[in-house]
Image: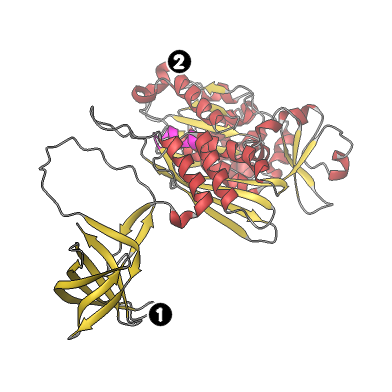
Amino acid sequence: MGRHSMNHVGELYACLYAKEFPAQAILRLRPELRGQPVVVVEGEPPLQTVCSFNAKARYLGIVRGMTRVELDTFSSLIVLPRSRSEEVSTHAVLLESAGAFSPRVEDRSDGCSFLCVIDIAGTEKLLGTPEVLARKLLRCVQAVGVSASVAMSRNFYTALSCVRGSSTRITLIEPGNEGPALAPLPLNVLNVSSEHAETFALWGIRTLGALAALPEKELIARIGQEGRRLRQLARGELPHHFVPHEAAFELQERMELDTPVEQLDSLLFVLGVMFEQLTVRAMARVLALASVIITLSLEGGTTHVRTVRPNLPTNDRSLWIKLVHLDLETHPPQAAIVAVTLTAEPGSTSKVQLGLFSPQLPEPMRLDVTLARIRALVGDECVGSPVLRDTNQPDSFRVEPFKVPPVHSPSSTTVSSLTAMRQLRPPQRVSITLRDRQPASFVFRDCRYEVEHAYGPWLAEGDWWNRQAWALEQWDLIARSRDGVMICCCLVRDLKEQSWQVVTLYD
């Protein structure tokens, strides 16, 4: 059969395998250590033992189970503690990468390696031939900082066994060639129990080919139905009921620092790598980062949480680092940092389309950085757009973050004469004379005015449930000075303090 004939069968599986997963999970966010021998240890000191290592450490003779005392004899070795949280995060990232190629992904990982099987039957027209798909899958995984290999077969367990036992990055097993492809592989790719492994060793069975050649009835008679299942695995004939893994899409990266960090500048390199991973994952789904929650785990068990939200979703890594740096400078943590977690909210990557004659808007990057610097000077609550509250209390508003307004097509506007109104901030106190409980005259800006017309009063009160309750009496007045200068104004009387203020002038 030809290479591409494997697409004409009903089933086709791609198995993604990343060995030495604890070491790869730690090195994913530490690219500066990938070229050095690195060992990951677990357990309580001083009884720590090696659980994983990279290829550089393997060349030095490192094996799993070595003690910390044995590791101290290697001068150039970097020893890191195992991080379960980073493994969980990396595991989710790899499942997310596999899910970009098919919605049917089955997770078969254990504590030492990442292993998943992707059902890619019928994806040739969308993703290309199996070999092309394998290359795309490995590039996607490499982009998130993990080294892996892929095996493809129409049999689920054949792909699993071949990816565990093969030394090549891409393995394609043609239909009908499952048995010969599995024959040279060692028995340990099947996860045989220790009891059965000892039995097979006594029989001289060391490869899958030798196991597949055993007569079925005699094998079942000696070790039971498990012998039949192992023989089917060795021949590439065992069927499988696919159980897809369903996980929610979550843009999150976590890194436990090797040593506590007190200076924010030392944190920027770590943030740069984490933001790079977040943007790669967002761009793979044609998304951008709309907001990021920074959670800093501090010494003493406390946390410091900040949220950064630019005006437009963006994947500009330098912009995110600058915004986070400015925010943390304004709101610094109160203790040394031991771990960092970034949780991003995805948003649309759409651009703002300007009209031909629309005014030019500032660049989002420059605008966000400028606003961040202003917030660092005056405070978060003093920067934004004023929005009126749903109340009758004068000058009651809140500040909301700036948003880029939608651009509409220009339309014709009708010009009409409007009355100009000047709001006085702060309101100016006045001395007033009442006649029959109505304003008769008042002194405003060292000038006395006689009231010619008075309209009101309009009463407003609210917030009776808290200490800032207010009760106001409002009058609209038309007054004239001795020099003949006429003004129109709005006077407000605070019924609690019995004070009068000019809040508005009408021209």
**Which image quarter: residue 90?**
top right
The one nearer the camera, 239 or 63, is 63
Measure how far apart labels 2 and 1 are at the Cα level: 80 Å
The one nearer the camera, 134 or 437, is 437
Q: Which mark is residue 3?
A: 2
* Residue carrying label 1: 467
Circle 2: element type: helix
Callout 1, which amino acid? Answer: Arg
- Which residue is most to the top? 2
On the image, the x and y values in percent for residue 476 come to 18, 70
On the image, the x and y values in percent for residue 431 come to 31, 76
On the image, the x and y values in percent for residue 87 come to 61, 45
Residue displayed at 65% across by 45% down: 264
The one nearer the camera, 315 or 203, is 315
- Tell me if I can see residue 158 in this picture: no
364 shown above or below 127: below
Q: Which residues are magenta?
A: 279-287
342 shown above or below 288: below
Residue displayed at 45% across by 57% down: 381
Q: How is this picture coloured? A: secondary structure
Instruction: Report whether 5 appears left or right of 144.
Output: left
On the image, the x and y values in percent for residue 26 come to 66, 40
333 shown above or below 462: above
- Which residue is most to the bottom? 436
